[in-house]
Amino acid sequence: MSKVRSKFDWSANILFVMSTSVILITFGIIQTLVFEAWNFFSELADSRGWLNIDWNFSGIFSNDGFAAIVILTAFGLERYLRNKKTVLKNLPSDLFHPNLLVKVGIWLVVLLTLFFGESLWIFLCALCTVLIWRRIANLQEATIRGGDGEVSGAWISTVTLVFGFAALMASITHGFSGALGEFFLQTEWTPSGACPDRRSLCENMSFGVNSLLLTTLQVAFGALIIAIPLGVGTAIYLSEYAHPRISAIVKPTLEILAGIPSVVYGFFAFLYIGPLVVELGSWLFENGWIDDPPNPLNPLNGAIVVGVMILPLIASLSEDALRAVPNELREGSLALGATRIETTARVMIPASLSGILASIVLALSRAVGETMAVTLAVGTVAAFTGNMFLPAQTMTAYIAQRVGGDLPFGEIGYLTIFAVGLYLFMITLALNLLGNRILEAYREAY
Amino acid sequence: MVAIDSLQPRNRRLRDVGEKSGSIALAGSAVVGLLFLLVLVWQIAAPTVVSGANGEIAGATEFIPENEFLVEWKAANWDGDSSYLTSQILIEISWDDSNGSHVETLNVRVIEEQYISADVHITESGLSENTVEVSKKEDLAIISSMNVPVKIEQISGPVPAADLTGLPEVGDFVIPAEVIVLWGEGPVFEAQELLAWISLLFLTVMLTRPIVSVLPYLERAAKQARYVKIIAAVFALGTMSFGTLSAFLGGLCWWACGVTVCRIGAGVTRLREAGREIHQTDRLLHSISNREDLLLSNRMLIVFAFLFIPLEISIPFLTERFQDGIYPYASGLRAAFYGTIWTMTIAMIVAIPISVGAAIYLEEYAEPNRITKLIQALVTNLAGVPSIVFGMFGLAVFVQQGGLGWGLGPSILAAGLTMGVMAMPIVVLASQEALRSVPSSLRESAFGVGCTRWQVVRDHIMPSAMPGIMTGSILAMSRIMGEAAPLIVVGAAAGIWFDPDPLAALDSGNPFTDFTVIPVAIYQWTGLEGEAWKSMAAAASVALIGLLVAMNSVAIILRQHFRKRLKA
């Protein structure tokens, strides 16, 4: 039987070329951002060098050094015990399986270090110790039970190593300078410093992007604090409780909320939420809870409005996740005599946890990349303060504000927005990849 | 393990409290979004109503030393011959100077006769005239030459129609819409447009309730389908050549008429061939091919054209007034509105064909190899990239000259291309969803009878997936229409006072390449000083949301229609 050679299929090739445009766009975005950011860093490096580290080895004896040593020791212990199964088996198992009281006590210590500890690293040290402890307990249980002894949670050791290394670097250095050190590790952002020629690079400009990044994170996590309870609560209500008539009102409401342009949200925050937040802030100021009188433009304002903007995303993705849980689980739990709230809390949420997590990660990415609402609500003062009632500036707001003025191509102000944009793109890309990975994993699970 | 026997009975009251409070908390979290939406709508809608009691010239409390105050009335109140048509217009003018306080009354007679404007001067000795005649739609200027504040208040008579100082019309919205039915200052309709609209209305009624006496004529016409279509096309092009929006809609109506005639006529022929009588109109409805879709598109066209052909709706805020540098209330969105329309048009032309092609490739052609996976992953992740990053891509590629840059400058074309690139991943995802929902039995049966892959796509899959693709594209467009961030980066300017030309960037001598869009106008107006600009930003927000709702409702109507059809 002779095989008939098929004709050259024009349609397939034309359509293939169309679909490769997506690759072109992605690489175009990366290429432009990287190219201009490279120009920025090399121009900065011409005057300041690439990376200078100001060592201070005696810092190992400080609090931070102590934290670093503890974290790294915990990491090493985990690695050691993972490879030496016999040692792990012979350890007394009571050591790792405390009762509820001890557990609560440990988490209380961790939380107290967060609120009253003087250093972030000490808190991370406490957290990593607890996590590694749980990890070793799980490993031991798996080893005793037999099998190959591999349990989930390998990410804990990676995270511990990263934290330990960061704590170590923080303790044994005074600071970083040079192009990379200044951009990624300093917290002063004055890209148009006071020098005679404002357009070109001069010595008293500083480019510590952390000022913008921390405000961005402040707004994004504030938004998550508002949106997670509301969004997940809405999703649970819609999938488990709601009468069809109520969900016929709530769902279109969420769709409308998702469809309102972000600049309108920004206008609303500027006009209405800002003054409300100022009232709250001045009450706090009068009672001495905060040090400075509040400003109508502030990160809290931005967090509220961005929280409402990402609420529909969390609600719809979480509802999908909850609806994907097989009905047998829900009915089994109800048949055992659990009430609805118990079924929800102990069966439905754990079963759909990865979907809910994915929705939160994607919402975080949306919140980090949100521009107009944040520009109008948070302000244009590029100075990070812990105080959420003072004006600040996020990364996206910096780009929007900077390009709003007269911005000639190729000069330092033009280059900074690409450096900031590249950083922003990397953060959101990482979050999107993570979120989509989790989504795919749980879609396969059911 | 806890032994079953040691389980304690649960505290029922505690359990009930937990159950109740839990469900109330969940319901509460579901309602918060609704509450927020209500507050948002209330807060944005409220500032668009500019207060001013009826019969009082708003802004009269603003003092006008050495300045003009211009008012005009739309309709006459004086027949030119000693009698008032409506009521008497009395304006009270008061001021305080060194000689004490003065109160003078001015009697304004608005007459039918045209082109007579009038000035009234305020001097220390009083008004130059106490009774003044002025044509309707002409200026009455009240001019003060003293250096003291003058208060002007209308105490009786019809309210002035427009106030050229840019202060708002009294007791009115910032976005007034004028509706004229057929006859304003003379006829507002063009005869051929109205004829097209009425014929389409008649033929659409025929689609639901056929009139038996007309059907034979339609059948005879449909036998010459080609000529009917040529005539419809000629009429359509002839009407469209007038170049206004209503003429364009009239042309569409003519074309829809031609198509409907052909369909009904063919239906009648088919009915006769099946051996039935022409009187069996209930059978006729089933023999018209694709009657439901035709009905939907005709109805949508009729409703939309109704607003512009028999009625003449004009919203000066959107389509007539440019941004005014001095008087906020005289500003409008004209440049921004046309800028948005052109940007969206270019974005659609760029994004939709390529994205639909990409979606077809990914769903119908692609082998599951590494490149396909890469493309799929990139599409999913591009949809989540912040919009401002797309703006920077547009800035570096479309706006900037040199390197990768195309050197289009901050223009409509660059903005449209940027928006098109931004819309692409969204449209691809929506189209993929639509293509995936086509049942695979359709595909397999088409392959089974020997179609090539392209024939399957063109003749079988695309017709079924088209509604989904259209809905997804409209929703994607409405989503990027509200985006301001990328266009700020691309370089949308403030205070544009000319209509944007979409291809201005290609003509290097054209100085008018600047543009703006509605979201950017909202952003810029919010940043300007003064309550009045906040009001205008609120009005622009209402206009933007109105446009988005209109687009989304078209998408929703389409979705509902085709979902119903799929079920049937």
Image (spheres, coloured by chain):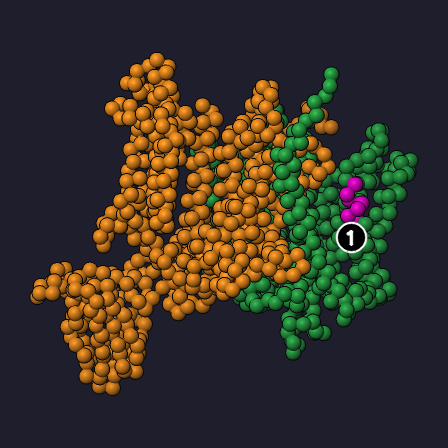
Chain colours: A green, B orange
Amino acid type indicated by mark 1: Phe
Image check: B542 left or right of A291? left
Residue drawn at point x = 65 percent, y = 41 percent: A17
Q: Residues within 10 Å of mark 1 (few under 14, many from 20)?
A: many
Q: Give the vertical position of B285 relative to B527 (above or below).
A: above
Residue drawn at point x = 32 percent, y = 20 percent: B282
Residue B13 appears anywhere in the view: no
Q: Give the vertical position of B558 relative to B511 (above or below).
A: above
Dividing the picture into quadrants, the one containing residue A142 is top right
Residue at image mark 1: A163
Closer to us: A421 or B400:
B400
Image check: A143 left or right of B216? right
Q: The C terminus of chain A is located in which quarter?
A: top right
Residue drawn at point x = 69 percent, y = 60 percent: A36
Residue B28 in picture, x, y percent from top left: 49, 42
For disc 1, the chain is A
Give SS at disc 1: helix
Residue drawn at point x = 21 percent, y = 67 percent: B115
Closer to us: A173 or B253:
B253
Provide the residue span drawn in magenta.
Answer: A154-160
Q: Is residue A159 covered in magenta? A: yes
Image check: A58 left or right of B510? right
Residue A412 appears anywhere in the view: yes
Closer to us: B347 or A326:
B347
